[in-house]
Amino acid sequence: MTPQTRGLSFIATFRVYTLRMWISSRYLYLGIACSLPFLIANVLVAMQADFFLSFLRPVGQTTSHEHLLVLVLIAIVGVGGLVALLPILKDRRLYIVNAIVGMAFLVFALFGGYALGKDFYHCDILKIPNCD
């Protein structure tokens, strides 16, 4: 092995080691996979896919079934955030990418659940007119 290839080997090994130090990929991928149902549902609603909208709103109006489905999808995103943070708690090492993604998912789930609950309370319980 020449000194040049030995140096390149060291750099490649250092990069792999540095990447492993910053990310726990299995848990990160599982956490991101937990957010996919929410993203897919949003894409289907944005595209106004008739089969999905007829499943969500069988009567044409917003129902409690729709609120429950959105709440479950937001909760699954929160679970994905916890899954992404799990190796930090288990290994007692700081995985930077996992921490960023996990905290972003948890913050999204917290604020999304709050906004959905507030919307449900104002529109369906207080029956405020023109609530949307």
Image (cartoon, rainbow, N blue to C red):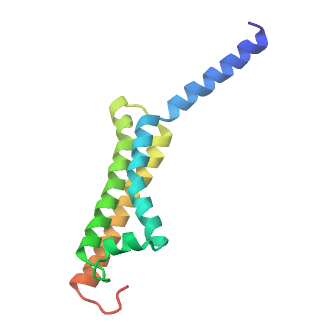
**Residue occupying the point 32% across, 66% down:** 70
- Front-most of residues 51 and 5: 51
Note whether 86 is above or below 37 in the view shown.
above
Q: Residue furthest left?
A: 125
Q: Position of residue 84 (x, y in %)?
A: 39, 43
Note whether 107 is above or below 49 in the view shown.
above
Q: Residue furthest front?
A: 51
Q: Position of residue 5 (x, y in %)?
A: 74, 14
- Front-most of residues 70 and 20: 70
Q: Is residue 63 left or right of residue 22?
A: left
Q: Is residue 27 left or right of residue 72?
A: right
Q: Position of residue 86 (x, y in %)?
A: 35, 39
Note whether 12 is above or below 120 in the view shown.
above
**Residue 13's image quarter?**
top right
**Residue occupying the point 40% across, 38% down:** 27
**Residue occupying the point 28% across, 90% down:** 128
Q: Quadrant of the N terminus?
A: top right
Q: Position of residue 8 (x, y in %)?
A: 72, 19
Q: Is residue 36 left or right of residue 128?
A: right
Q: Is residue 89 left or right of residue 3?
A: left
